[in-house]
Amino acid sequence: MMKILYLLPGKGMSADEIDRRTSIANSLANSDTHVSVMEVGEGPLSIESAVEEYMAIGPMLRKLVLIREENKYDAIIIGCAGDPGLAPARELLDIPVIGPAEASLLFACMISDRFSILTVLQSGIESEDSTRILVREKGLEARLASIEFVHTPITDMWGKEKDIVFEQMTQSVLKAKRSGAGSVVLGCMSMAFLMVDDVIEEKTGVPVVNPLKISIKTAEMFVNLQLKHSRITYPGTDFTKLNSTVFKH
């Protein structure tokens, strides 16, 4: 049985929402894969600003050290479409660590020449900068057609009525299509867990890349192919040094 951990940065998601996400994640995985959904247990409720992103990373890395010691999982998915802490997480662990954004952007490039990203507001405004930085860091800015937004806060998407968010998402995908996008990447895992990408694709004619689906299948593929991240790009952590300071129990 392959074991994958979907690790949610931060703290505060209800047990019902975690159970809902666990059920959805396992419905997408292969029959011989089990996906566990777990919160870090420390940090912000959601990540909708640079402050919340950076405050989430430290606690997540400390949690990953404990997870490394337990040695229970074959791969880990960072449960945020901004891929917070992806590089240091890969330095800490010897198993595949999947960033939903990175994986989804690369898949979008395989199905379209240009893609748009549908994301949430940053500190309550339509700020493109953090998303553009993420795309630029992957070397894909020339493939970016536009960045579109939904105005619903992340926590309002957790297991609640989908109609308002669905309509916002549909209109944003149509806007992206007018901007020349051949596909649209969902830039928020709470949007991904709404599981409306297939319906939006049918209504708009635009392929919608769901980072939840992509990250689960990418994790399974890495494990099956026995692929690991390069220790040249992601040098292994000096635990002797860190265990005496920041990771001291």
Image (spheres, rainbow, N blue to C red):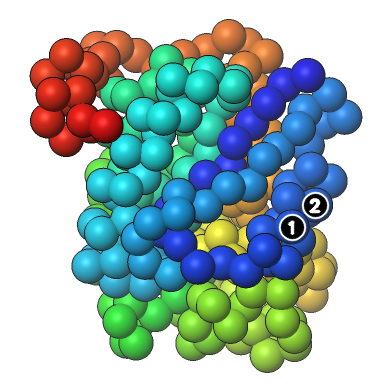
Is residue 192 positioned above or below 228 on the image?
below
Q: Which mark is residue 19?
A: 1
Where disc 1 sits, the SS reads helix
Query: Residue at left 22%, top 67%?
Result: 51
Badge 2 vs badge 1, beta-carbon distance below 8 Å: yes
Counting from the top left corner in percent of width and height, residue 187 is at 49, 62
- Mark linked to residue 226: none
The spot of residue 72 in percent (x, y) is: 59, 22
How far apart are labels 2 and 1 at the CA level?
6 Å
Tell me, yes or no, if residue 37 can be seen here: yes
- Quarter of the rendering occupied by the C terminus: top left
Q: Amino acid at mark 2?
A: Ser
Q: Left of 200 or right of it: where is 54?
A: left
Residue 141, given in percent of the width and then of the height, sits at 31, 52
At x 82%, y 31%, the residue is: 30
> In the displayed structure, does residue 114 sit left or right of residue 48?
right
The label number, if any, that marks residue 23 in the structure image: 2
Quarter of the figure with residue 198: bottom right
Q: Is 77 situated above or below 49?
A: above
Between 107 and 150, the residue placed more toward the observer is 150
Residue found at the very far right of the displayed protein: 31
Label total for image = 2
